[in-house]
Image: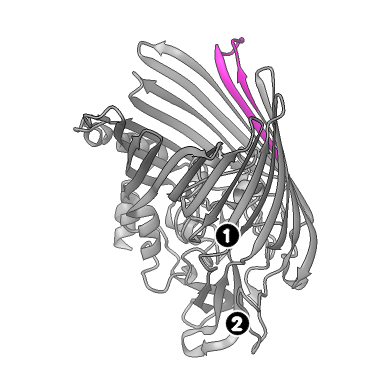
Amino acid sequence: MKKSKARDSTRSSAMRALLVSSGMCSALYAPVAGSVELDTGNPDIKMRWDNTFKYSAAARVRGQAPALLANINGDDGDRNLDKGLISNRVDLFSEFDITYKDFGARVTGAAWYDRVYNQATDNGSPRTANGVGNSYNEFSRAARKVHGRNGELLDAFVFGKGELGTIPASFRFGKYSSLWGETLFFGNNGMAGTMAGTDIVKALSVPGSQFKEIVRPDRQISAQFALTSEITVGGYYKFSWEANRFPVSGSYFANDDILFGGERVLLPIPLPNGGYASLKRVNDYTPKDTGQGGLQFKWHPDDLDLGFYVTRYHDRAPSAYAFLGTGANPAIGQLGVYDVAYAQGITAYGVSASKSVGDIVLNAELSTRHNTSLVASRPILVPVGVAADNDNNPRYPIGNTAHANFSFIWGMGPNAIAQEASFLGELAWNRRLSVSRNPEAVLNTSERDAWGLRLSYAPSYRQALPGVDLTVNTTASYFPKGNSSAFNGFGVDNGGDMSVGLEATYLDSWKGSVSFTHYYGNKILQPGSIVAQQFKDRDFISLSLRRTF
């Protein structure tokens, strides 16, 4: 409690916290030695090494809503970071490229440190904390690793191009990301979502991010062949599986304390010591690394781009099984256990079209998924003695779904607002076609159909000040029907988010930004619902400054 109070005294208001934190930028971004082009002495060999340093801070501007704190299995993130500073972070992104004629390699990596996640939390509710190995007012080890301090290798692959007989061909092998289809923001609703894991933390931290900006790399091999000037075919095969990067339980954007770093399911049964009865997490059933791949056929007649796709993949978001009575220890309030399971062996088929009409690019994509896991009750209650896993005994609902995405990209010319601007939009829809297994496990508040949209408008002002280019970024989403039963995380029923920000670039070297994000929609949680606006009380402002050397 003493640490929490000390921390509160340094965070009296959101704006003050950001201004104080921004004063660190001059020290963190002092010029450092770095290389860009590396001289190899051979004109056929080109090497480049770039390092981007970034400082960012964010602050919560609204207090906690009692209606949201009442969800004992989704309140830790809300309680841990009250009004004030929620992030105080330094990032390093390093990228190295080398090419020799038509062949090359690329390696990228990232490291970060966030002071907020390396100190005490604001949580004053020990009875509703879902962790077991840490104090209620400390971030878990998983939260510190994902959000607080870590480093990782991202891309690491080789590539090349040439001719296979008379057919132009290209390949990549290693760790990287690749996407097919024609989606902008709602990639998880399209073929792209079947091909790569996503960084949900980044998507929530930067609302309006395009899907290509939040994908995670996988170990894989891919190749593409140009059969004619109009027809290309390609394929890939993956050698690994990785779950999506979700906000860890207790972090600011976490609204689930069970699945992602969670260690207990709390039951609404009070204990004499003031806590709640619980279920302990035991097993995680993850998919095998093999069995994922895809094929594509691209046809480019005249000014139209057509694509046809088939992929096989494993789900990157889990379901949870609850076993009451199994492994029970009433003396400590443990009434059972729970497991987490990821579905595997899902097949998707899709078709896409893209066409330019003047300054506007119009895109459409239709797809269907077979043997896919559907949105399930959380957790799924499994009777005693009944097996449950992600292989021969799945207890999550399985079925078929249909998906559609329609989008546009408009590069706007001079008008009354700005000399140039970009205007993007996407409409996404999905439907549960059928349930082939475990229909009783489908979340009862989900619906057969769901749809939503997002718009993004960004006017730019070149040389608004000497050496300074400015861009105003605005984005908003709305889901008239967000209760999707096709997959988790589609949207908020009758709600969404909006963000407005200003980005400045100085001499094409320094880049800074400031933004405000607001969430809207019904914050009241229906029993078993996961689609109410659980971020209703988490509006925030953020700023960043970065430079590449």
Q: Residues within 10 Å of mark 2 (few under 14, many from 20)?
A: many
Looking at the image, residue 133 lies above or below residue 53? below
Q: Is residue 133 within the magenta segment?
A: no
Residue 499 lies, in percent from the top left, at 55, 34
Residue 8 lies, in percent from the top left, at 35, 51
The answer, for residue 121, to whether it is visible in the render is: no
Helix, strand or loop status at disc 1: loop
Q: Quadrant of residue 488?
A: bottom right
The one nearer the camera, 481 or 199, is 199
Residue at 51 percent across and 47 percent down: it is 215
- Amino acid type at circle 2 is Phe
Task: Please indicate whether residue 97 sits to the left or right of residue 189 in the image.
Answer: left
Residue 483 lies, in percent from the top left, at 72, 54
Looking at the image, residue 55 lies above or below residue 127? above
Residue under pointer 2: 323
The answer, for residue 353, to whether it is visible in the render is: yes
Looking at the image, residue 356 lies above or below residue 151? above
Q: Quadrant of the N terminus?
A: bottom left
